[in-house]
Image (cartoon, rainbow, N blue to C red):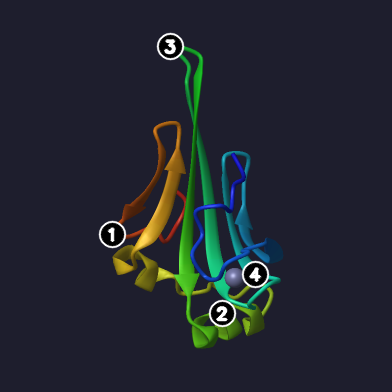
Amino acid sequence: MNSSSFLDCCREPRLVRIRTLSESSHDLAALQRCTSCAAYWLYRFHEYTDWASGVDDLTSWFTRLTDEEGTRILGAAEHEQTDLSFVRRRTSWLNDRDGVRRVKGAPHQPWS
Ligand SMILES: [Zn+2]
């Protein structure tokens, strides 16, 4: 499945990563921007491995940001802790092995 086919910023969403906010072996948070309509998105990825069953659980969240939020995150100093707490109450897209669905909020920090 095209990973961006459910995104709803415009008719032909195409996201590129413009800034990595945090990254570890199992978590990633990045600021992304649509090259078609210039909308900002917050992307978060989490991988959870169930060692008992050997199953990898991969979860992605996509949260649409306002221009003001995107600009603020993009302009933050390199090691500044960016406040992302607002995404906890922001309707987001969640994509995991059960498919894509709307959720009422996204995690604002790594899950692990
Ligand atoms: Zn777009």
**Quadrant that contains the C terminus:** top left
Name the secondary structure under disc 1: loop
* Residue ID for mark 1: 104
Q: Residues within 10 Å of mark 4 (few under 14, many from 20)?
A: many
Q: Name the spot of residue 40 as percent of width and height, x first.
A: 57, 74
Q: Distance from label 1 to label 3 (Cα)?
A: 30 Å
**Quarter occupied by the N terminus:** top right
Q: Which mark is residue 52?
A: 3
> Which is nearer the N-term, disc 1 or disc 4?
4
Judged by depth in the image, the label closer to the viewer, 2 or 3, is 2
Secondary structure beneath dot 4 equals strand
Q: Earlier in the sequence, mark 3 or mark 4?
A: 4
Mark toward the viewer: 1 or 4: 4
For image coordinates 39% across by 32% down, the residue present is 98
Q: Which residue lies under the disc numbered 4? A: 34
- Tell me if residue 111 can be seen: no
Tell whether label 4 touches label 1 (CB within 8 Å): no
Could you say where residue 24 lies in the image, as x and y percent from the top left? 62, 46
Lower position in the chain sequence, tag 1 or tag 3: 3
- Amino acid type of the residue that numbered disc 4 sits on in the rendered structure: Cys
Query: Is there any visible trace of residue 41 in the rendered image?
Result: yes
Secondary-structure class at tag 3: loop
Residue found at x 44% / y 11%: 53
Sequence-first disc among 4 and 2: 4
- Where is residue 39? Give x, y as percent: 58, 76
Q: Which residue is depicted at the point 65% across and 72% down?
A: 79
Residue picked out by circle 2: 70
